[in-house]
Image (cartoon, rainbow, N blue to C red):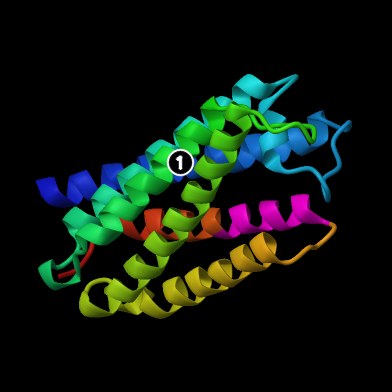
Amino acid sequence: MNKKHLLLHVCGGFALAGVLFFFLVAAVLQFLRPDYSFMGTPLSFYLLGPHNGWLHAAFYALAAAIVLLAVGCYLGGAPQARSAATLVLFILGAAGVVVTALSPTDINDQLTVHGTIHVLAAALAFIATSFGMLFQSWGLRQDPAWRPHFRPALELAVFEFMVLWVYALAHIPARGFMEKLTIVLILLWLGQAACWLSVPRRQ
């Protein structure tokens, strides 16, 4: 394994660890916080109250995972498949994740400055990461080593994008569930991309 493959393996491995850590913490908190409704309560609410430190750590781990994955995909991709726009989108998404964790959400109808920042940061995290997934998936078709992953990556990215806008625009009562479904789909895409990145590629 040469230095480049080792770097990609490390980026992919740590990115996968961050994604899995986020998923496990978020999943366990659904059982540790019975005062919250799984179907109705957004994940942001779990950043407040008991066990919130674990979720804060998970948000930061996810942000790091997104950056590692973005850098790994950019450096490991064929020159014709690289996109600076995709790299920027993922970094913006990661920044949105961090700010979302740092700025508490409003848990009542009173709008606050930190609550507004939280909403805007969460929107940035969702939208920038989703577009990054779409662009990265589309770019795989131009990379001989990644081309076999083009279709499954793009299909999952498109499906997540559709679910995201249903969640954002449709007035569905189970908004907590729709948000969590969107997050799970993002984690699935990031996780599979991290697995592909960590496996030595044949040029």
Residue 150 location, quadrant: bottom left
Taking the image as drawn, is residue 198 in sight?
Answer: no
How far from the left and from the top, in percent, is residue 194?
39, 53
Residue at 48% over, 61% down: 189
> 111 or 24, which lies in front?
111
- Is the residue 14 above or below the residue 189 in the image? above
Looking at the rendering, the stretch of residues picked out in magenta corresponds to 174-185
What secondary structure is marked by label 1?
A: helix
- Is the residue 150 above or below the residue 186 in the image? below
Residue at 48% over, 69% down: 157
How far from the left and from the top, in percent, is residue 43?
69, 40
> 9 or 103, which lies in front?
103
- Is the residue 190 above or below the residue 23 in the image? below
Identify the residue position indicated by label 1 in the image: 96
Please indicate whether residue 77 sits to the left or right of residue 184 in the image: left
Quadrant that contains the C terminus: bottom left
Residue at 75% over, 31% down: 110
How far from the left and from the top, in percent, is residue 7?
20, 44
Residue 101 location, quadrant: top right
- Is the residue 131 above or below the residue 146 in the image? above
Main SS of residues in magenta: helix
Residue at 20% over, 58% down: 84
Residue type marked 1: Gly
How far from the left and from the top, in percent, is residue 12?
34, 48
Label 1: few (<14), some or many (≥20) within 10 Å?
A: many
Find out whether residue 200 is within the magenta segment: no
